[in-house]
Image (cartoon, rainbow, N blue to C red):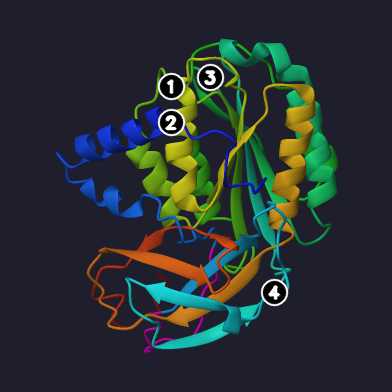
């Protein structure tokens, strides 16, 4: 099963999508409608920078994405000839680069829901998260941070590549309280946007939660918007049990939050599911492509521009973020490089 698909796609998700779009359309944040899924489109995660010199404006879009086949296995031997790239439904003016199995640095935020509703599997979730970081983070190259959220959002360990410090922070997490899910995502996305190291680093949030928010000062839209602006992929490990007749409200929320970023939701209700979910995220991070291009008819107007990476083989599926916000023209951007 690919990381971005679920064995079950109940009608309630579609209903929630419609309701969410309808609500947002009443506000200045209505642009989120453009970010909703397209069946054959991909969605990118983190992005790479175009670093040039002053007095030159660089309008380059950088996309990280994965490709899976009909069996859910990742495909990592494609070439650029196997794909069509569309930016705002137009072919790019030029492709700057394309590389397979990107070994770019990784910046990861581990977000753990500490509310009362997730206490049953809490110990195993912590153990699996520590093991995941040990297997994924490469010494001297990758870094991660740990955030726990309940009635407040707390940074338990800042960016580090030290597995010992990260594991210690995870083990010290204690459950209890309400849930500030959206605030936690906004906090983590902002940290990733300002992550230390090269701007080419891949950015990802690993979120362990049931999707129920009870205390956030921000909205769901704010969380999605923050992730898109920071070019961060959100992978969710859902603690919900979806085996019953009633589909949990929080599950639909998790779908809405993760899919526009190029991530998705994986079941993590039982110990075997938690272990499998972390393995799937690990596979995704190790099977990524990176592409950079200059959009056609690009304007610095702050608008949302869609991204589609379409595989030529109909049995393949691309997973990448749905788009990006073009920068706005300012006096500074006229003389400094910009990176969508």
Q: Quadrant of residue 332?
A: bottom left
Q: State the separation of the CA atoms marked 1 and 4.
A: 37 Å
Q: Quadrant of residue 55?
A: bottom left
Q: State the separation of the CA atoms marked 2 and 1.
A: 7 Å
Give the vertical position of 276 relative to 290 (above or below): above
Of residues 13 and 216, the one nearer the viewer is: 13
Q: Earlier in the sequence, mark 1 or mark 4?
A: 4
Q: Identify the disc placed on residue 100.
A: 4
Viewer-nearest of discs 3 and 1: 1
Q: State the separation of the CA atoms marked 2 and 3.
A: 17 Å
Of residues 170 and 324, the one nearer the viewer is: 324
Q: Is residue 180 visible?
A: no
Task: Identify the element where label 4 is drawn.
Answer: loop
Residue 65 placement (x, y as % from top left):
58, 63
The residue that disc 3 covers is 150
Q: Earlier in the sequence, mark 4 or mark 3?
A: 4
């Amino acid at each position: 099963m690919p990381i971005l698909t679920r064995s079950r796609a109940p009608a309630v998700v579609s209903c929630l999508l419609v309701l969410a779009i309808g609500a947002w359309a009443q506000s200045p944040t209505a642009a989120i409608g453009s970010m909703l899924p397209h069946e054959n489109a991909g969605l990118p995660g983190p992005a790479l920078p175009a670093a040039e010199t002053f007095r030159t404006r660089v309008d380059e879009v950088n996309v990280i994405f994965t490709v899976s086949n009909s069996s859910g296995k990742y495909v990592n031997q494609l070439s650029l000839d196997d794909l069509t790239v569309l930016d705002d439904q137009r072919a790019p003016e030029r492709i700057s680069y394309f590389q397979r199995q990107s070994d770019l640095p990784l910046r990861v935020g581990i977000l753990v829901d500490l509310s009362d509703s997730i206490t049953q599997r809490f110990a195993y979730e912590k153990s699996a998260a520590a093991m995941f970081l040990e297997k994924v983070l490469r010494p001297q190259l990758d870094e991660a941070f740990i955030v726990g959220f309940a009635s407040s959002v707390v940074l338990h360990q800042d960016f580090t590549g030290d597995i010992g410090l990260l594991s210690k922070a995870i083990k010290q997490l204690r459950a209890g309280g309400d849930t500030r899910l959206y605030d936690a995502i906004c906090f983590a996305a902002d940290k990733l946007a300002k992550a230390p190291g090269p701007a080419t680093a891949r950015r990802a949030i690993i979120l362990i939660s049931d999707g129920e928010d009870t205390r956030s000062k921000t909205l769901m839209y704010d969380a999605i918007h923050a992730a898109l602006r920071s070019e961060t992929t959100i992978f969710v490990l859902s603690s919900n049990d979806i085996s019953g007749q009633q589909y949990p409200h929080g599950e639909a929320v998790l779908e809405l939050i993760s899919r526009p970023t190029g991530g998705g939701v994986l079941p993590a209700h039982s110990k075997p599911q938690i272990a499998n979910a972390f393995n799937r995220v690990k596979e995704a991070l190790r099977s990524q492509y990176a592409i950079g291009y200059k959009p056609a008819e690009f304007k610095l107007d702050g608008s949302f521009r869609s991204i589609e990476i379409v595989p030529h083989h109909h049995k393949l599926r691309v997973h990448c973020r749905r788009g990006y916000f073009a920068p706005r023209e300012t006096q500074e951007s006229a003389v400094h490089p910009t990176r969508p």
